[in-house]
Image: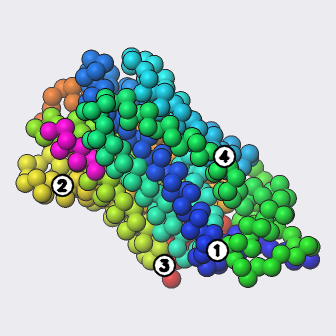
Amino acid sequence: MRQIDVQKLCDDARFGKFHVLLLFWCALIIIFDGYDLAVVGIALPSIMSDMGIQPTSAGFMVSSALLGMMLGAVFLGTIADRIGRVPAIVICLLLFSIFTAAAGLTRDPVTFGIARFLAGLGIGGVMPNVVAQMTEYSPRKIRSTMVTLMFSGYSVGGMLAALVGKGMIERYGWQSVFLAAGFPALLAPVILKYMPESLAFLVRNERSTRLKDILSRIDPRYVPQLADRFSLSDREGAPGSPIARLFAEGRGTSTVMLWIAFFMCLFMVYALSSWLTKLMAGAGHSLGSALTFVLVLNFGAMIGAIGGGWLADRFNIKYVLIAMYALAAISISLLGVKVPVAVLFFLVGLAGASTIGTQIVTYAFAGQFYPTAIRSTGIGWASGIGRGGAILAPIVIGFLVSKALPLQQNFVAIAVPGVIAMLAVCLIDARRSRNDGIAVAAADPA
């Protein structure tokens, strides 16, 4: 009888066809998720004009989805460790596709907010699950790069929303970009059939046949045998509930600091995603030009995510994050300074790289920090707590916009959380991630 450590097999495997297909499916889901998330910010000026609402009310409309995202991240992230990640991912996909499309059929702020809240459950719930899925199956040496490559789909989705918005809002109305979001629901059966289930879930439920099939595709050198038995290197049978284990074995302080970093980073991300178009339009730029800023923001995010992941696999991921948060605070503060348009575009791209891109690297760090058996739970709670910042951001910035403050003060308010996030990451003890057997760069650069 052979005892197979499935996590070690995945850690040591060579990058191959299995990883390409998994990256494709996870990135595609994140593209859809990013579109659904960005579409409100793209359409917000048109929605405000059509429904006759003020900035503060618009902030509450945007935050309805973010409240759903907070609950979805916590509930659907935690439940995935019990029902399986693939069913949880499919549930999330259906939620955010169907109800984002439904928001396009609404005619008043209340109904719109309800539809966006339900869509938010799926938008928030899918993120911790795909991060956990990619982290679990990626070879150790390129784990951060794989997660950030996957999450670059978030920026692609944001750019897609901006492109669709530029082509359709003025011609067909803001509703058209929401109705287009219903398409991904058609892919749910395909994802349910072809995406591999979580290793931890399969081991716990003794799905040996399925494990043998997946492991032989991950590493062709593995030849299944009838008497094979499977286990995880992170002691999946450790006592305690998944939530309690987030604070066990010395992880308590680091877990709280991770929550603070998520909160502050998501504040910056959603403040920019929700109000950049409106702030730039208010600064004298046309709607088309303001939407171009959103494209640049998301292009910068993609560069920042991929670059940050590459750096995290080669250097100390903790210090990479600290530098990126510092860059976020600086670049956002400078957005309110009067500079040539070309410099402004550069600063917007830099802000995207150091906010959205940094958030993606933070997801990668969280995915490596927690053991496999509680990974979705850990990422889900960090993401869920972080959604508090996402909920607060549109409301706070909407309030500041309603006060007609100078442009620079609005951007300084968005930048301050970057400093707080930087300090929180400084206090995270990355060595606690070693109980999963994961060689995180922050713990051992070699």
The coloring applied to the image is rainbow
| Magenta span | 286-295
Would residue 87 be found to the left or right of residue 140 on screen? right
From this view, report whether residue 98 is shown above or below residue 13: above
Q: Residue 322 sits in which quadrant?
A: bottom left
Secondary element under disc 4, as helix, strand or loop, is: helix
Disc 4 target residue: 189
Q: Which of marks 4 and 3 is in front?
A: 4
Q: Which residue lies furthest to the front in this view?
A: 171
Identify the amino acid type marked 4: Pro
- Of labels 3 and 2, earlier in sequence is 2
Classify residue 366 as left or right of residue 171: right
Residue at position x 31%, y 46% in the image: 163
Comes first in the chain, label 4 or label 3: 4
Q: Quadrant of residue 9?
A: bottom right
Tag 4 and tag 2, C-beta contact below 8 Å: no
Q: Earlier in the sequence, mark 1 or mark 4?
A: 1
Pick whichever, 330 or 255, lies toward us: 330
Magenta portion: prevailing SS class: helix
Query: What is the distance, in whole Å, between disc 1 and disc 3 at their CAs?
Result: 17 Å
- Dot placed on the residue nearer the N-terminal end, 4 or 2: 4
The residue wearing badge 2 is 345
Inspect the image, locate mark 2, and give the three-letter code of the amino acid beneath it: Phe
Residue depth check, mark 1 versus mark 4: number of the one nearer the observer: 4
Relative image position of residue 46 (x, y in whole percent): 27, 28
Residue 320 at x, y = what percent?
39, 67
Residue placed under numbered mark 3 in the picture = 445
- Of the two numbered discs 1 and 2 in the rendering, the one whose residue sits closer to the viewer: 2
Q: What element carries label 3?
A: loop
Amino acid type of disc 1? Asp
